[in-house]
Amino acid sequence: MPHDDPVPVRSPAGEALPADETSSVGNTPLATVSRSSDTAERAAVPTVTSGVSFFSAVNIVIASMIGAGVYTTSGFALADLGSPWLVLLAWGVGGLLAICGAISYGALAERFTESGGEYLFLSRALHPAAGNVAGFVSLLAGFTGAIAFAASTFEAYADGLFGLYLSEWTNRGWVASSLVATAAVVHGFRLRVGTRVQDSLVVLKLAMLTAFLLFALFSLRQPWQGATTAKSGWADLSVVTFAVSLMWISLSYSGFNAAIYITGEARGSGPMVRRALLCGTLVVTLIYLLLNGVFVFAPPADAVIGKQDIAAEAARAIGGNAFAAAFRVAILVSLATSVLSLMMTGPRVYAKMADDGVLPKFFRFDTEVPRAGIFVQAIFAIVVIRLASLQQLLSYLGMTLSLSAALTVASLFVLRRRGEVIDLPLYPLPPLVFLGGTLVIAVVAGIEKPIELAFAVATLIVGLIAAPFSRRHSSSSGAGTNR
């Protein structure tokens, strides 16, 4: 279709307006526009010259990705797959899917330059109901569940280091809840303070992980035993078992999209966020392959198989108790940055949903930070911490977030079919690889984990039920305000 063909203006709710009518979004009258004027309008979106830098955006991606999953998942995966080679293969496949996802999400971030993430993309590209599904997935799983998972893992590693529990029942969750509350305070008052604290901790985290890898490679107390002490795994491998492990691993990679939630506050907006997504994902994929190579190959298999704190157990096998204690400190820093990052990005989605009338108005923010959303998010996460175990959260989050991400990437095909020119290298390969791989993993794993699948589907249904209540959007939803 030629670029100068007229197309109907869409209302904030995504419905086409008649060509002979006008509507107002904010105080701006709208009428029929052309493809070329749509391109010009996108180019005219003000570029943010202050706010979140490229360095901070990459750090948000790294902080969101390197969290609880990488320090827990391989112990469960090794128990299921048997072979450390299969575990490493699964991490490689997960990395390939994450890179394809980062490329696809980057194209969407350049097209839709506001903060809001999957909720924004699907509301504008498909339909408000689809946006509601993604928004409530973010609310219930993407941020609330992920924060609870990272904070609970923080508590498990802290307990192993300091022996914090006085009673299994009376004190469970208090360390995790305190971390969540601290993250809310850090991000609840000044954007600059929160980003500076987070940037510093991410740099410290990367330095500690690098030190761990160097020690593992050059200061071994004994030869690596993982490959010789584990069962082969290949003969007993099933597609279902591999898919379940990939589902857990996909959760560790799910933060590849983290920078999209602050697009409207990023210097350079969409194009900068696009670069940050790919850069952060490539860095983390390399780190994951190196870390998990150490986790499953260095120690004897029986020392780490099925262990939720596999990273610390691997460190103990490599360097003894002192080294294991030092690495637990590195893990605690890493998990703290994950909670900080998720606490920063999640409430931006809720603010966009409030702008569109999906959530109450108090989630909106005209100040520097979405304070109400941050503190409500903290309360939700603390409730989940008290109710769910780590492995339950791992399966539920992996399945739910996979389905939401697949729906988001699928919107690229809809936009292209509608005639929108979206720059995406190697199209349609990246979205096809991500979409196909993610759906196969989710479906096969769901057959194996029906309870977690039921909760994942229930989360999607919550978003659909809320759709009728969001038909009337606030005027700010179509104004293209950058937040």
Image (cartoon, helix red, strand yellow):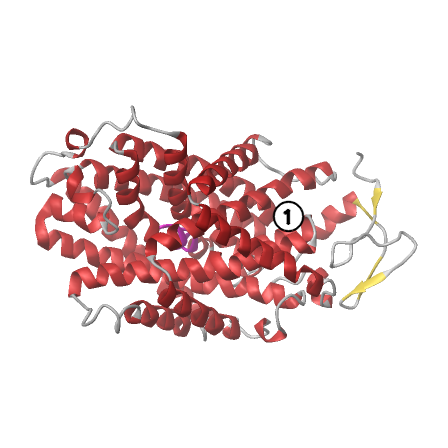
- Left or right of 213 in this view: 254: right
Q: Position of residue 405 (x, y in %)?
A: 53, 46
Q: Judge by depth and name the residue closer to the eye, 10 or 235.
A: 235
| Secondary structure predominantly adopted by residues drawn in magenta | helix
Q: Position of residue 287 (x, y in %)?
A: 31, 42
- Whether residue 148 is visible here, answered yes or no, is yes
User: Was residue 59 drawn as part of the magenta stretch in this picture?
Assistant: yes
- Left or right of 156 in this view: 400: right
Question: What kind of residue is marked 1?
Answer: Arg
Query: Which residue appears at 49% of the width and 54% of the height?
Result: 455
Query: Which residue appears at 20% of the width and 71% of the height?
Result: 167
Query: Which residue appears at 48% of the width and 41% of the height?
Result: 442
In what element is the residue under mark 1? helix
- Whether residue 255 is visible here, answered yes or no, is no
Q: Is residue 46 above or below residue 282?
A: below
- Specify the farthest residue to the top: 235
Q: Position of residue 290 (x, y in %)?
A: 27, 39
Q: Judge by depth and name the residue closer to the eye, 30 or 452.
A: 452
Q: Judge by depth and name the residue closer to the eye, 301 or 210.
A: 301
In the rendered image, the quadrant that contains the C terminus is: bottom right
- Left or right of 24 in this view: 61: left
In the rendered image, the quadrant that contains the N terminus is: top right
Q: Which residues are magenta?
A: 58-66
Q: Quadrant of residue 289?
A: top left
Q: Is residue 245 above or below residue 40?
A: above
- Left or right of 48 in this view: 205: left
Q: Is residue 168 above or below residue 207?
A: below
Q: Position of residue 478 (x, y in %)?
A: 72, 60
Q: Is residue 379 above or below residue 480?
A: below
User: Was residue 111 drawn as part of the magenta stretch in this picture?
Assistant: no
Query: Which residue appears at 40% of the width and 49% of the height?
Result: 395
Residue at mark 1:
111
